[in-house]
């Protein structure tokens, strides 16, 4: 229907997550309507990021050099490591301003049905990082079946001296009990805490 170059652009855009054929077509036509000086920076940014961005050799976060900006920051607490599935998972944790330790990106979650075994993730590299200076490992994998299985597997591999914690889960702020599913509500009950100090 379109020229080969336009067809190719639509097909490439449709390969992006969350972009279907119609959205890809709209984006392609938007790009075509723009002046060259408006769209060339996008093309250059894509090429530049693919040429310059790799993975941190220590934590496997995105990095422009050997280390990511977090691992290179000497002000971070090296005694605490937060384990996440993907680099994108670091962003919401950082936004809270509550965590000042280091991270470790697994590159996914265990899923034998999909052929993802421990050797396919950066679990061995995590275990190698847990030296005498590390006193806590926070497992912040997703609250899914695969995320839970991954957290349990890693917890079993950790040295006994290391405190292994899991992010709390339960009802979101502003949520109604009426709309909570059984799993979320069950976790909220399991993770309940006292609102006043208990007398000893």
Image (cartoon, rainbow, N blue to C red):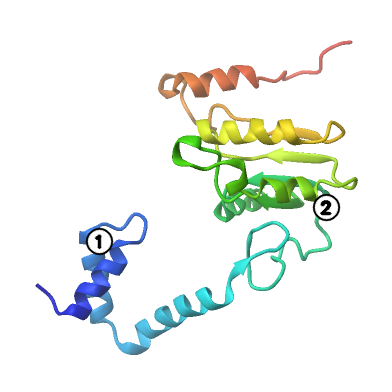
Nearer-N-terminus badge (1/2): 1
Numbered label tally: 2
Q: Residue at x 73, y 59 (%)?
A: 58
Q: Visible in this render: residue 144?
A: no
Q: Secondary structure at mark 2?
A: strand
Question: Where does label 1 land, which residue?
Answer: 23
Query: Could you tell me if residue 60 is visible in this image?
Result: yes
**Above or below for 174 versus 131:** above
Is residue 104 found left or right of 150 in the rendered image? right
The residue that label 2 is drawn on is: 78
Image quadrant assignment for residue 169: top right
Q: Nearer the viewer, residue 126 or 26?
A: 126
Residue 190 found in image quarter: top right
In the image, taking residue 17 as reference, residue 193 lies left or right, namely right
Which secondary structure lies at badge 1?
A: helix
Rendered-image quadrant of the C terminus: top right
Quarter of the figure that contains the N terminus: bottom left
């Amino acid at each position: 229907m379109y020229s080969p170059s336009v067809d190719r652009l639509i097909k490439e855009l449709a390969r992006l997550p969350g972009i279907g054929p119609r959205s890809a077509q709209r984006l392609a036509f938007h790009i075509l309507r723009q002046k060259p000086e408006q769209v060339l920076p996008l093309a250059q940014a894509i090429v530049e990021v693919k040429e310059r961005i790799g993975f941190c050799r220590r934590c496997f976060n995105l990095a422009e050099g050997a280390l990511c900006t977090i691992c290179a920051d000497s002000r971070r607490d090296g005694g605490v490591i937060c384990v996440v599935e993907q680099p994108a998972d670091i962003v919401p944790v950082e936004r809270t301003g509550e965590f000042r330790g280091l991270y470790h990106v697994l590159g996914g979650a265990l899923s034998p049905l999909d052929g993802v075994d421990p050797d396919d993730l950066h679990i061995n590299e995590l275990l190698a990082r847990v030296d005498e200076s590390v006193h806590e490992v926070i497992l912040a994998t997703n609250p899914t079946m695969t995320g839970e299985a991954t957290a349990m597997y890693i917890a079993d591999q950790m040295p006994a001296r290391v405190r292994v914690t899991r992010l709390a889960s339960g009802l979101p702020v502003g949520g109604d009990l009426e709309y909570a599913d059984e799993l979320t509500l069950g976790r909220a009950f399991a993770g309940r805490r006292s609102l006043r100090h208990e007398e000893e």
